[in-house]
Image (spheres, rainbow, N blue to C red):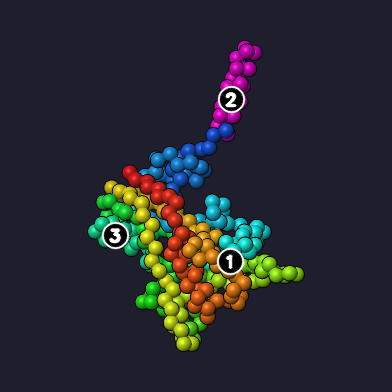
Amino acid sequence: MKTIKISTLSILVLSILTFTSCKRKGCTSELATNYESKAKKDDGSCEFDNTGVILTLDHKVGSDDLVFTNKSYYSAVGHEYFVETVKYVLSRVRVNSASGGVEVFTNMYLDAGDVSTLSKTSSIEIPAGDYTGITFTFGLSAADNEAAAFNSSPATNMAWPDAMGGGYHFMKLEGFYDSLNTNSTLQAYNAHIGSIDGMGMTQENSWEISLNEAFTIAGAHHVEFHVKMDIQEWFETPNSYDFSSWNNGIMMEMMAQTQLKENGQADVFSLEEVIMHQD
Ligand SMILES: [Cu+2]
């Protein structure tokens, strides 16, 4: 009798250890009918009764997660810098196919400091077929850059001055940097980009980005796109952005915005992952 008790106990202990030592598997997609909130690792069991697209933006510096305020980074020209704010606008997100594709999101406001803004869900149906990736506009095209693009705060706080053409800032990337001057204290930088049309200047500063990865949709599904924004890349390749060359605000500095734009068209955005769940 005693030995049976002991072995029952040891089986119990063993099973508790086994259970706690491996991550719980299950369906991790919130759009699924069998979503398991406690599951940490997706096991491919998700079932859907409709279609969905989720776009999630991840903010990194190289391969590390962006850390605000308390961690410093080094720009290509050697300035130590800190990041305080990364707020921006993306629009016209499309899932692409050879025959055209489908627009899944119109205008979106994102704040890297507010996780609730970083994952967007669309229930627009994407027909079965082969797809080539996604495309979006950084900022708002000339046709879309109107006050009506957003109607509530905090997105409306991105408004761009009417005297400079109105519409919205496409990005507010802000923080502090060490100017390397003797006895220098940290200086503010406000890397604000938007399309300029006023005060004698005209400059279109939205652009389209295509991130390619082939995937196939067949039947009810849910596709997740994880897009990375590499903050460091705003300041290097092809242009080594020199904080000390500009005033702390660059809204009237077309050259500064051109540098950011060219860097933004190069390596800032990349597609980290396309996760397909389908029945
Ligand atoms: Cu501004």
Counting residues from the start of the chain, the first of labels 2 and 3 encountered is: 2
Residue type for callout 1: Thr
Residue 195 is a magenta residue: no
Counting residues from the start of the chain, the first of labels 3 and 1 encountered is: 1
Q: Position of residue 172 (x, y in %)?
A: 54, 70
Q: Which residue is mark 2?
A: 14
Residue type for callout 3: Gly
At numbered mark 1, what does the secondary structure look like: helix, strand or loop?
strand
Q: Position of residue 43 (x, y in %)?
A: 43, 39
- Residue 85 numbered mark, or none: 1
Residue drawn where x is 70% and y is 70% of the image: 181
- Residue 143 numbered mark, or none: none
Is residue 122 found left or right of 18 in the rendered image?
left
The answer to which of 208 and 44 lies nearer the viewer is: 208
Q: Which residue is mark 3?
A: 101
The quarter of the image holding the C terminus is top left
Question: Assess mark 3: CB under 8 A from ligand 1?
Answer: no
Q: Position of residue 254 (x, y in %)?
A: 49, 78
Q: Determine if residue 159 is in view.
A: no
Q: CA distance from mark 2 to mark 3?
A: 52 Å
Counting residues from the start of the chain, the first of labels 1 and 2 encountered is: 2
Where are the magenta residues, as a range?
Answer: 1-20
Check whether the beta carbons of the residues at disc 3 and disc 1 lie within 8 A of each other: no
Q: Residues within 10 Å of mark 3 (few under 14, many from 20)?
A: some
